[in-house]
Amino acid sequence: MLRNSLFSGQRSAVSGQRSAVSGQRSAVSGQRSAVSGQRSAVSGQRSAVSGQPFAKRGHRPRPLAVPVAWA
């Protein structure tokens, strides 16, 4: 009977470690989404800056074809 109680305790400890690891993974995925958001903001600033010289020349600013391949 004592062995069974010890094994059940070890199993619960292992399951707790797994839940902690899954929590860290979700936090990492959240950081990645935040980084991708910052990159999109930077690309938007670049397109605005590049559009200024075209506007000065009298031409319509062309939208930059920036390939979005961040995953």
Image: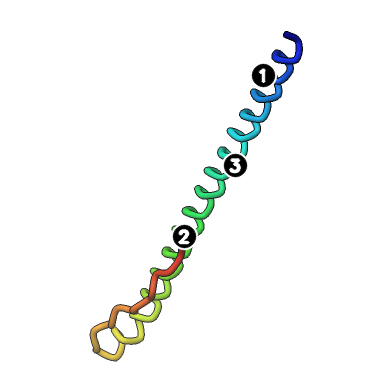
Q: Contact (CB < 8 A) between labels 1 and 3?
A: no
Along the polypeptide, which appears first: circle 1 or circle 3? 1
* Label of residue 36 in the image: 2
Q: Name above or below for residue 3 compared with residue 14.
A: above
Report the mark closest to the observer, 1 or 3: 1
Along the polypeptide, which appears first: circle 2 or circle 1? 1
Residue 16 in percent (x, y) is at 63, 28
* Label of residue 24 in the image: 3
Horizontal placement of 27 versus 3: left or right? left
Going 35% across and 86% down the picture, which residue do you hit? 53
Along the polypeptide, which appears first: circle 3 or circle 2? 3
Q: Alpha-carbon distance for marks 2 and 1?
A: 43 Å
Three-letter amino acid code of the residue under disc 3: Gln
Q: Residues within 10 Å of mark 1 (few under 14, many from 20)?
A: few
Q: Which residue is mark 1?
A: 8
Residue 51 in percent (x, y) is at 33, 80
Report the mark closest to the observer, 2 or 1: 1
Dot 3: what SS?
A: helix
Q: Alpha-carbon distance for marks 1 and 3?
A: 25 Å
Q: Name above or below for residue 46 compared with residue 9.
A: below
- Image quarter for residue 3? top right
Q: Alpha-carbon distance for marks 3 and 2?
A: 19 Å
64 or 52: nearer the viewer: 64
Q: Name above or below for residue 64 compared with residue 42.
A: below
User: For the N terminus, which image quadrant?
Assistant: top right
Residue furthest toward the bottom? 57
